[in-house]
Image (spheres, helix red, strand yellow):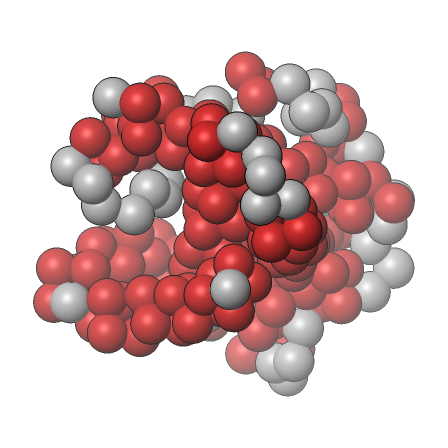
Amino acid sequence: MFYAILSISAFVVAITLHETAHGYVAYRLGDPTAHSAKRLTLNPLAHIDPFGTVLLPLFLALTGAPVFGWAKPVPFNPGYFKDPQKGTMLVGAAGPATNLVVAVLAGMLYRALPVLPPIPRAFLELLCIVNVYLAVFNMIPIPPLDGSRVVVGFLPPHLVRAYLSIERYGFLIIFGLLWLGALRTVVFPVAEALFTVLLG
């Protein structure tokens, strides 16, 4: 239970910063959608999805598995961007990039402050691990994950609509890959290599 509480706390921090980063970049590019929906905030309650943010991470934490999940996606409208493809790419990249920055900072503090009491030290370790997993998982190029938004920035315009149409089947594809163990083979080793480097 102690591990679960720390893991969920780290996860809530990670997804709150992740979703706020999406909204902030969209806002800076001229899109007021997230701001109008009151999602441009660091209040975790604005981003919580009951299953993806609470139940699934709690189940994983209690079973000792890596904690991951999702929040309510921050809405954005590419129609406000001067360059919709580039804007979509920047908004998509903002969440994982923020998670990587947080992971690096948490890892640096973890290594620089070995005399910290056990609880804050464990929290820093989990904060690093959860942010790395969230960043790597979200960069999978399957709509609606953030990696697909980054791919949009490099596609010829006539292929964008067809590529994003996969989104209706996105979660089925992702859960299928999870069930087959494909993500464990690809995503987990990448994430583990990153947080091992960061934590030492």
Residue 170 drawn at (x, y percent): 33, 57
In this image, 68 relative to 18: left or right? left
Q: Residue at x 26, y 67 (%)?
A: 183
Location of residue 5 with respect to 14 vertically, above or below: above
**Quadrant showing the N terminus:** top left
Give coordinates of residue 150: x percent, y percent: 61, 68
Residue farthest along the front direction in this orientation? 115
Closer-to-camera residue (200/182): 200
Residue 44 % position (x, y): 57, 21
> What is the residue that sits farthest to the bottom in this orientation?
156
Which of these two is toward me, 19 or 151?
19
Which is more toward the observer, 77 or 108? 108
Identified at 58% across, 45% down, the residue is: 114
- Which residue lies at the image location 15% right of the left edge and 67% below the top edge? 181
Residue 146 seen in render:
no
Residue 85 visible somewhere in the drawing: yes
x and y percentages locating residue 166 in the rendered image: 37, 63
In the rendered structure, the answer to whether residue 146 lies left or right of residue 84 reads left
Up/down of 182 relative to 46, above or below: below
Residue 28: quarter of image: top right
- Residue drawn at 52 percent across, 37 percent down: 121
Looking at the rendering, which quadrant does residue 62 occupy? top left
Q: Would residue 131 appear left or right of 30 to someone viewing this image?
A: left
Tally the numbered discs. 0
Where on the picture, by quarter, is residue 96? bottom right
